[in-house]
Amino acid sequence: MPEPYWPKDRNAYTLRMAERNRTIVRVRCAYCKRVAYYHPVDLMEIWGDVEVDDLMHKMRCEAGKDHGNMDVRCISPSAEEMQGMKIRRLTGIVLTRRPVWSEKGSRGTGPPTPSPSIRSARSSRRETPSP
Ligand SMILES: [Zn+2]
């Protein structure tokens, strides 16, 4: 296994620095032990140049949203180790449309109202949300 790589000041270690150091981001679910590897540049595409430590709160396990925080580390695998690693690459980002409601005269958050999920502008035309 590649050795985990931690810089001296881990609080200031961002994805851009991880990319500059040619490290790979290893994300592991402590709950179900799933492991995935990412290029820092792909994660930057999603969250920007955030601190690597912040990813443990931002990323969620695909096997279950209730799996808690991820174990996120930067690793420097050797060329040999890289060959056996399946690194996930970002192929696209899907933007979902989410309705935001407000009612005249009401301030703050009221009781929860059903909000339909809208996949795209085209498919949502027929399912017009009722107020
Ligand atoms: Zn999990």
Image (cartoon, grey):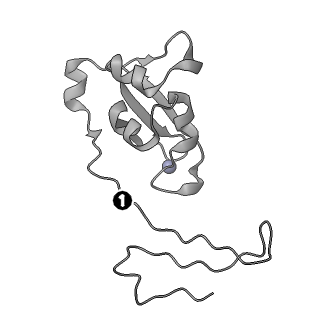
Q: Which residue is mark 1?
A: 94
Report which quarter residue 24 is drawn in.
top left
Seen from the viewer's position, the closer of residues 96 and 61 is 96
Q: Quadrant of residue 2?
A: top left
Say which of 108 and 113 sits in front: 108
Asked if residue 10 lies left or right of residue 87, the reply is right
In the image, residue 31 sits, relative to residue 118, either above or below, namely above
Res 93 quadrant in image: bottom left
Task: Give the answer, above or below, for where 93 lies relative to 18.
Answer: below
Regarding residue 102, the answer to whether it shows in the image is yes
Number of numbered markers:
1
What quarter of the picture does the C terminus occupy? Answer: bottom right
Residue at 47%, 27% in the rendered image: 73
Identify the residue at the far front of this view. Answer: 104
Which residue is found at the position 55% from the left and 37% from the top?
56
Q: Tell me the amino acid under the disc marked 1.
A: Val
Residue 3 image position (x, y, % from top left)? 40, 17
Visible in this render: residue 1?
no
Left or right: 3 with respect to 61? left
